[in-house]
Amino acid sequence: MDSIASCSGMSKKTLYQFFESKKSLFETLIIERLFAPIPYTPVETDPLQKQLQLMMLLIAEQLLNEERLGLLKSIITETTRNPAVRQIVADLFHLSGRALPVQQLLSKHVDSGDLQINDVEEAADLLFSMTLGGPLLAHLTHCKPPKEGENLTHFIEYGVNTFLKAHSNQK
């Protein structure tokens, strides 16, 4: 807390007026910076393919920014070293109650009969993996050049198209 207070230009006493404990500060950081809602409202007249592509591009824009990547790297490091931090992150993920707009959009199209999906949560994870998993891993680990710009857009389009071919009722 001394280091955080110093970096933020305030006293530790002032910091404790905002956050009652280190855990409270950490939870607020995770909820507001990592699990922040993705503001996406699809254009109803757009084809589902375009809606999903735009949504995944928006998620990529938010997820692959330097601040969020730095936070993810720190959390990954701490969760592997500290079981208490791992538990806090897991609890916050489940308690945040903020379903990604991917799940909501897929559910809507399952209900309307456009998509055939048995488990929407699993399908949303699959779509995320197909479109953003590789680029996120490349950014976090530097294992290969990260996809950016047009390369990222084409990769997301390919993932969305592959996903829709597997789940569309209009095959």
Image: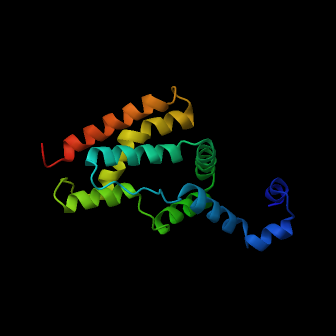
The one nearer the camera, 141 or 99, is: 99
On screen, 18 above or below 6?
below
The one nearer the camera, 141 or 44, is: 44
Residue drawn at x 58%, y 43% is 65
Q: Quadrant of residue 102?
A: bottom left
On screen, 88 above or below 133?
below
User: x, y (%) of residue 139?
Assistant: 54, 35
Residue drawn at x 39%, y 57% is 41
Residue drawn at x 33%, y 54% is 43
Q: Quadrant of residue 157?
A: top left
User: x, y (%) of residue 59?
Assistant: 46, 48
Q: Is residue 72 left or right of residue 137?
A: right
The one nearer the camera, 88 or 99, is: 99
Residue 147 visible? The answer is no
Quarter of the N terminus within the rendering: bottom right
Q: Is residue 134 left or right of residue 86?
A: left
- Most distant residue in the top direction: 145
User: x, y (%) of residue 3?
Assistant: 82, 55
User: x, y (%) of residue 112?
Assistant: 18, 61
Quarter of the C terminus within the rendering: top left
On screen, 39 above or below 63?
below
- Most distant residue in the front direction: 45
Residue drawn at x 43%, y 36% is 134
Residue 82 visible? The answer is yes
